[in-house]
Image (spheres, grey):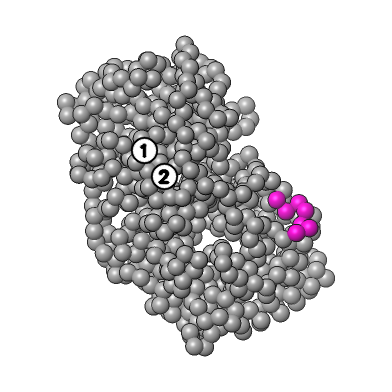
């Protein structure tokens, strides 16, 4: 096994955060190193920071969150958007919905990803010199000419020194937070019955000890296999060991194929693996995050279910992975989009289930108190019924590489182009009409600059694709439409009083989403108006070193936390207008705010530095890749400098 880089955690007094366990009273992260600059405050971690110090494991069918002491605090089973069998993350102070291995008299814990994999290794040590390792993963590897990715989590427990004494606790929930008390014991398994699904634990550990949560000595390696109610074929510990080796080999091979930048390679690799884990491979849908209802800010009520596919967010994932030369996600996603947009008799919705057609009707889970007790916990998302016109551009942009990338076994053709044209027609028809915008306002509609710019981009790219395919008449048609839209959008989005492009046409409020318009090609990054916009955003939307998406009141009042994606957009905009050194400093400082596993959520608190919002957030992880690719020194330049 490749040795993971482990981060030691020293004992510290702390309130038990949601998603923690009793051991968290003794074990907490040490102070986080911070870079200087941008007004950031050097400080130790808060309870909130510890609560989202989580790793994600998965296999593109299921995903689970593991905390630094090896407790699984969140797992939706048997797919990303299912009822969570482990729901401790959102259970407030209730000790339910988790699986952990408690080491008696523990004094130290270390946890990290095994390098270049989605496998997490946690080492614990007790007061008597006893040590053990817990290895967590979801199997993923080639088998019978296809990828084996069962809805299953494997936990391997190995004694390393002394005679560690452990307690294995498995406390699943069903129906979004109701404890699952019903169980039956077989020869080497326990069936937990609750709701529509049966969770089966197959193990070579003593079953009675697990049921009674009895402390016992760990004298040999043990394995737990959690998954569907099916017999476990083969010897459990041996099979678990082989599955780990195959899964490790798969991920390390996948990473080996990435075209990473010279700098920040480990951060980019971790981001890429995380994005891949957000892709539901069966259909090609890409979830925005693996959680629901982590508040955007403490006690704000801004709690949303992100376990679905936003066409906008998915485009950013596809763009980021394409930059690293892994295009399979794009190909699978386009198959998903084709299914979603098969019939365009009505506006294309902004968000869809990972299995298209499933209802996203929003409701409240009354049996879950919420993250750190901050409810409500929502299931489904009412944004599915909104009009967000940027979706049309997001779909077309996600498909454009299909027409120019010669590495693809099946490139985009006139057939795919004709499938995209109806989406372009909707983009043109809605470009200058009000919508809910990229921030999904629930109480107002405007002609948002970002939405209009994406509609323009749909028309513009269709014109370029038509030229590539030699369809001169269609190219003229789309280029004419794009040129007309560009003039109207740029004219109405510029605000002399603000000295910037603003968030909605003919409206003075500033919005960080306009930082994207140069990257889209609507304006040149050298356009004095865009340069002025970047400067204005950097002054007026900056709060203690963080870029807010906007500062005006919305449906819930003034926003308290900063949307991390906007900070990455600001970094890219700084680089585009020539302020590269400033962009690099901002980027380096932002990387320091990742949790100890290298992951980011949706938002960050400008004052406390705590991560908030759903986790791990694809927008944020894609931002790491896009910014690093833009800012990194080139491989050839580094070696030329060394040789000279």
Mark 2 highlights which residue?
A: 369
View extreme (bottom): residue: 496
Lateral position of residue 475 relative to residue 457, left or right: right
Question: In the rendered image, which quarter contains the C terminus?
Answer: bottom left
Nearer to us in this view, 181 or 353 = 181
Residue 270 appears in the rendering? yes
Q: Secondary structure at mark 2?
A: loop
Q: Position of residue 246 (x, y in %)?
A: 49, 29
Look at 47% across and 11% down and name the residue there. Answer: 187
What is the x, y in percent for residue 601? 43, 53
Q: Is residue 441 above or below residue 530?
A: above
Magenta stretch?
A: 340-346
How packed mark 2 is, by other alpha carbons closer than 10 Å (few <14, some 14-19, many 20 or more), is: many
Q: Residue at x 24, y 23 (%)?
A: 164
Point out residue 464 in the picture as x, y percentages from the top left corner. 71, 68
Task: Note whether residue 501 is visible.
Answer: no
Within-10-Å neighbours for mark 1: few <14, some 14–19, many 20+: some
Q: Circle 1 is placed at which residue position?
A: 94
Residue 380: numbered disc: none
Point out the residue furthest to the front here.
366
Front in this rendered view, residue 375 or 113: 375
């Amino acid at each position: 096994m490749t040795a993971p880089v482990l981060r030691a955690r020293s004992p510290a007094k702390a309130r038990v955060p949601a998603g923690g366990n009793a051991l968290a009273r003794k074990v907490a992260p040490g102070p986080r190193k911070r870079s200087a600059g941008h007004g950031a405050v050097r400080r130790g971690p808060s309870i909130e920071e510890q609560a989202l110090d989580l790793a994600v494991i998965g296999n593109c069918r299921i995903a689970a969150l593991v905390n630094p002491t090896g407790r699984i605090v969140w797992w939706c089973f048997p797919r990303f958007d299912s009822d969570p069998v482990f729901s401790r993350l959102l259970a407030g102070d209730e000790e339910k919905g988790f699986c952990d291995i408690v080491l008696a008299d523990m004094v130290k814990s270390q946890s990290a990803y095994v390098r270049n994999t989605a496998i997490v290794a946690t080492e614990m040590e007790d007061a008597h010199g006893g040590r053990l390792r817990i290895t967590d993963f979801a199997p993923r590897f080639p088998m019978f000419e296809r990828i084996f990715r069962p809805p299953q989590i494997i936990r391997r427990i190995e004694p390393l020194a002394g005679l560690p004494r452990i307690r294995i606790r498995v406390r699943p929930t069903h129906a979004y937070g109701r404890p699952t008390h019903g169980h039956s014991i077989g020869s080497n398994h326990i069936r937990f019955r609750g709701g529509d699904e049966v969770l089966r634990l197959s193990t070579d550990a003593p079953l009675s000890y697990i049921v009674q949560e009895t402390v016992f000595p760990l004298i040999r390696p043990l394995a737990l296999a959690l998954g569907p109610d099916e017999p476990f074929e083969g010897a459990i510990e041996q099979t678990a060991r082989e599955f780990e080796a195959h899964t490790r080999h798969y991920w390390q091979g996948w990473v080996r194929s990435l075209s990473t930048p010279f700098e920040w390679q480990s951060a980019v690799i971790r981001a890429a693996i995380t994005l891949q884990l957000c892709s539901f491979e069966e259909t090609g849908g890409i979830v925005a995050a693996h959680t629901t209802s982590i508040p955007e800010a403490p006690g704000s009520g801004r709690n949303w279910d992100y376990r679905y596919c936003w066409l906008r967010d998915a485009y950013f994932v596809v763009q980021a992975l394409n930059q690293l030369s892994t295009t399979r996600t794009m190909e699978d996603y386009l198959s998903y989009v084709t299914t979603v947009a098969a019939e365009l008799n009505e506006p294309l919705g902004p968000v869809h289930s990972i299995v298209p057609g499933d209802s996203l009707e929003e409701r409240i889970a009354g049996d879950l108190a919420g993250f750190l007790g901050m409810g409500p916990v929502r299931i489904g998302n009412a944004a599915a019924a909104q009009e967000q016109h940027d979706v049309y551009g997001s779909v077309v942009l996600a498909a454009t590489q299909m027409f120019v990338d010669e590495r693809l076994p099946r490139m985009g053709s006139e057939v795919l182009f004709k499938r995209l044209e109806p989406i372009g027609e909707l983009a043109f028809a809605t470009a200058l009409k009000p919508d809910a915008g990229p921030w999904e306002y629930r109480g107002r509609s405007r002609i948002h600059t970002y939405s209009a710019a994406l509609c323009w981009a749909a028309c513009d790219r269709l014109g370029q694709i038509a030229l590539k395919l030699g369809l001169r008449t269609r190219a003229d048609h789309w280029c004419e439409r794009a040129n007309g839209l560009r003039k109207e959008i740029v004219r109405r989005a510029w605000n002399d009083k603000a000295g910037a492009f603003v968030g909605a046409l003919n409206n003075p409020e500033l919005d960080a989403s306009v930082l994207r318009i140069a990257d889209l090609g609507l304006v040149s990054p050298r356009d004095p108006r865009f340069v002025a916009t970047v400067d204005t955003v950097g002054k007026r939307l900056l709060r203690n070193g963080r870029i807010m998406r906007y500062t005006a009141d919305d449906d819930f009042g003034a926003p308290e936390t900063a949307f991390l994606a906007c900070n990455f957009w600001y970094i890219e905009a700084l680089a585009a207008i020539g302020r590269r050194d400033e962009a690099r400093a901002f980027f380096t400082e932002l990387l320091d705010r990742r949790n100890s596993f290298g992951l980011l959520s949706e938002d960050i608190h400008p004052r406390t530095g705590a991560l908030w919002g759903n986790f791990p957030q694809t927008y944020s992880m894609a931002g790491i890749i896009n910014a690093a690719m833009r800012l990194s020194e080139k491989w050839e330049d580094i070696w030329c400098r060394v040789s000279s």
